[in-house]
Amino acid sequence: MKKLDGFYNQNLSRKFTTVILLPLTIVVVIFAAVLFGIMERNVVMSDFKYMENSMMRKRDETATKMEPINMTTQFFLSDTELSDMLGRVAAGDHISGAQWLEFKKTKIVDLERLVNNNPLLYGVRVYADHDSVQEMMPILYGRARMERQEWAKEADFLGWHFDYTDNTFAAYRMSQSDKLVSLITEIRDYDGSRLGVIEAAMTMENMFPSLYEGIEDEWSCFVTAEGMRYTGDSCQEERYLDALPDGSLSVTDFKDIETIYLKKQRLIVSYMPIRELDGVLVCVKDITANLNSVYQTRNVCALLLLFFLFLSAFGINSIVRRLLRQFYEILNAVRKVQKGDLNVRIQKQSQDEMGELSDQLNEMLDRIQVLMQDNIDREVLAKNSEIRALQNQINAHFIYNVLETIKMMAEIDEEYDISDAITSLGKLLRYSMRWESGNVRVSEELEYIKNYVTLINLRFDYEILLSLKLPDVVCRQEIPKMSLQPIVENAILHGIEEVAEDTTIYMKGCLVDGDCVIEITDSGKGMNGEQVEELKKKIAGRIETSGGSGNGIGLKNVQDRITMAFGSGYGLNIVSREGCYTKVIVRLPARIGKRQKTPVPGQIGAEL
């Protein structure tokens, strides 16, 4: 977990580089491991096949080598003249010199010619069972000559003998270095008595050439059933001997040629049973050099792979940093914003998601600056309102006392119309000069409008009626103070006053989709389409307004106050028809007021 935490704490470029490089490394390593594993198996299988084919060839060669020994032995055994001569010697018959000479010319020469015609044979000798025989080199010898041979010292010397030196003649032995393999066979008379022994010999090198080839990384050994091991001139290295099982090898242990791979020793071992010789030929091939070649190639590739991954890490990191350059610029901009610099802007460098994010952040910073400026303007407006309210409160009590005195004088003189007018004026002044820190209810604003219309009617010869159709839920909605009265005042001054006849101002309200909608309609002169569009632009601030009557500044102030209080989705809308009417639609969020300072009109919807 600590290692993962360390990884997660790295910067994005290193994370992306690691995430990209790690799977690539794993894939390449697995691919290389599989590839070199296949190469190693191919080397082993190639040498494995080589050893199997080599052993099959050796099996055919061995059969070819044994054939002349067996055939020559059988030929000697079937020679009746040779058997008869040995029988006469064994019986003690007198054989003259002429007879021996004749025997040599007619038989020994033929046998010698037979042996010499086969170059694979070292020689074929017949040892008589008695020393009285006339020795005739290189075929016929006496018993004493046989007893000089190593195999003759064995109790049962019949059969095959391996790796011995020819001791027939002492002087001859000094110059003889060949090791022999021979088949020893008895010559018996008709009655079963032994007449002599046939030694059909061949050099070990001819019989087992693999023991003397001296091929690098190859070694051979012939193992008899008695456990004797013959290795020829090969160096008996311990690692090769380890390939042989302990004890003897029997031909019955193998059905045919068997080849195995000793992975630990890196040796391929083939066993070939030779049933005629009652032994097993073992050939071993050391594949260490071949495997080392594969391993060296693997090591070089591993170094190249590490170098490639090292360069890839730099390349991938460079590409990732280039791709994240926009991100880092955004991050630096956010850090500057965090320190209070809202004037910073992000330069767009690409058309991808990062480029879109930079655009969105720039728009967000622009919006924040606008909202901050709006908030400053709102606070300035609130402060100005507080200052004006404080200024108005300075003489409020004096004005109220004067109006109360005038009202009492009018009532004393029974001028009740004047008394009612002064009462309405007092309420109007009291509402307008009362400082409010928040919004008021619609019902409070309606009470002020009714007093205002009462005083307006004192000025004109005609009467302006006020028709109210607002349900109780609308009357309890919150609204910025002095936001409806300027609309009524604007309707009277710019719509009704020029008509100069009895008319009605209609006010109705309802809740629509969670908003409170109040419509104020006058039956005045109305406006054409161009005038309506111009007034809308003034209210929205798209056209500069200046002081004076008829420039829409009163409606713009109402729009600004509603927008600052509730947001840009709320405010005024104008609908008018020239010579007919003008309707101002006020949209506010539905908010229930928490206080009621002025009583709700007792008769909602009645005309005054």
Image (cartoon, helix red, strand yellow):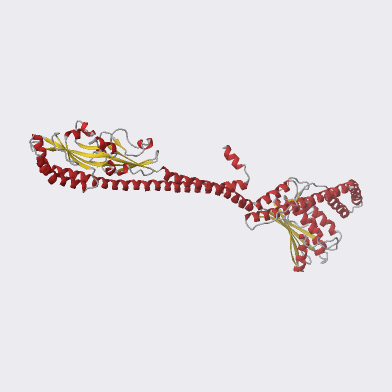
Relative to 197, is 350 above or below? below
Q: Position of residue 231 (x, y in %)?
A: 32, 38
- 412 displayed left or right of 128: right
Residue sitting nearer the eye, 365 or 162:
162
Residue sitting nearer the eye, 103 or 526:
103
Visible residue check, residue 323? yes
- 197 displayed left or right of 209: left
Residue sitting nearer the eye, 278 or 34:
278
Quadrant containing the C terminus in the rendered view: bottom right
Q: Position of residue 111 (x, y in %)?
A: 16, 45
User: Which image quadrant for residue 5?
Assistant: top right
Q: Residue furthest front?
A: 97
How many labels sit on residues?
0
- 331 displayed left or right of 197: right
Visible residue check, residue 164? no
Quadrant containing the N terminus in the rendered view: top right
User: Which image quadrant for residue 72?
Assistant: top left
Q: Position of residue 373 (x, y in %)?
A: 77, 52
- 225 displayed left or right of 307: left
Q: Position of residue 95 (x, y in %)?
A: 9, 38
Residue sitting nearer the eye, 298 or 601:
298
**Residue at horizontal 79 percent and vertical 50 percent from the top:** 376
